[in-house]
Structures are given as C-alpha cells and as structure tokens.
Image: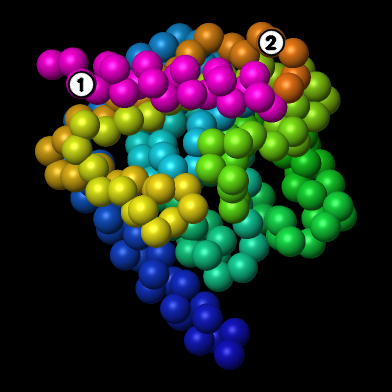
Amino acid sequence: MNLLVDIYTSIAAFFVQLGMLLTQKLIRIEKYGFENLHQSSIYAFWHEAYFVVGFANPFEKVAVLTTKGVMGDIVSKAIKIFNPKIIRASFDGGAKQSAYAVFQMIKSFQEGYALVIVPDGPKGPRRKSKSGIFFIAEKTGAKIIPVGIAANRKITLHFRWDKYFIPLPFSKVVIFADKPFSGPHETILLDKALENARKKAEELVMKN
C-alpha cells in the first residue's frame, strides 16, 4: 500500500512540477518591494498564492513548512525544484506536532534559513491568520514581511477552501513585498497587513 501511495504521489508531483516549470516560462513576473526582504525575515503570504511564490524566491536558504499526508507528500516533492529545506508536520496531531513544527522552524532560522509561513494554512479559514507566526517571530527576532501576489489572468479553484489560483499562459504576475509588520502581535492586524499587500499587488497587476 505504501509503495502505491509513493508511486501516486511521485507521479502527481511530477505533473505539478511540470505545470510550475511551464507556467514559469510562460508568465511575466514583476517584483516590487524586494528591498524589504532579508535572509533574517519571515516571508508571509496567503495560501491561495502558493503555486507561484517559489518563482520569485530571493533567498539562498529558505525553510518551508508543509503538512504530512498524501497532499503534503505531493507538495513536498513538487517544490524540491526550488531547493528549500522542507519541514513536515501533522496539523491534526495536536499540540505535540504543532510544537515540533515551531521548534524546527526556529532551529532553521538559527541555521541561517529565511522562513516561509502561510498564516492561513494548511486548512484555513481563508485569509485568517493563526498566532503561531508571532511566537516564531518573537523567539527568532525575525521581521514578518507581508507579501501580496496577484495575476491579471488566472484560473481560480473555487471548490478549494483557499480559492487557490494558477496564472494562465502569457499573464502578468505581481509579487509585492510590503514593509515589515510593526503592529501589536494580533492576528486581526496581521490579516489587515496581508490584505493591504494583496490589494497593492492587485492594483499593480492591472497597470500596463
């Protein structure tokens, strides 16, 4: 059974990788605010934009958190083309698994990795942050950088909780990195900062 699952996830990951590579060749990416990104930062964006964010990774060393399970296997195998450090944790495994994930992210930061955290992942609610990102920021001293991502033409998967989107060929994608989040560590304020970054990316992507 495990062999069949491994074959399935490997095949699925191959097609996801192929889709990513083709998309990367056929879209135009514009980057704004990347002077705000540093190796000692936390790169935060909404789960809906996960497909394209790896195309514009500015870091030499980056750590990414993914869930365990079949879908996590596919994602972990697919994003290896971007050469991240992949940290796996089960988000249905209670406090012990959550603590493990946080510990591994903190350890990775201490080893010189920038951190990628999707505050509304892995299962939502959509565009609602969880507080774990603040604990990591406090323990590491890392700045949280809200990142907005938008495409002028895209397919949106409305059946998914996150409304995941995939840019269409020959579309323009804007990745906007805002100034470091500086407010009190409250999720509602981080939500607002991430939404401001997303809306700024939406504005920029509509400009010629």
- Check the picture and name the quadrant holding the N terminus: bottom right
Q: Which mark is residue 206?
A: 1
Q: Is residue 110 left or right of residue 114?
A: right
**98 up-or-down from 71: above or below:** above
Q: Is residue 46 above or below residue 159?
A: above
Is residue 135 covered in magenta? no
Q: Tell me which segment is drawn in magenta.
A: 187-208
Look at the numbered disc 2 and give the secondary structure of its residue: loop
Q: Amino acid at mark 2?
A: Gly
Which residue is labeled 2 in the image? Answer: 183
Residue closest to the far right: 96
Who's the residue at 55% across and 70% down the image? 70
Q: Position of residue 19 (x, y in %)?
A: 27, 55
| Distance in Å between CA atoms under marks 1 and 2 | 29 Å
Q: Would you call the spot at circle 1 few (<14 residues within 10 Å), some (14-19), or many (20 or more)?
A: some
Is residue 82 visible in the rendered structure shown here? no
At 38% from the left edge and 29% from the top edge, which residue is drawn? 149
Q: How would you classify the magenta stretch by its main secondary structure?
A: helix
Q: Position of residue 89 (x, y in %)?
A: 71, 56
Residue 199 coordinates in the image, percent (x, y): 39, 21
What is the three-letter code of the residue carrying label 1? Met
Question: Is residue 188 covered in magenta?
Answer: yes
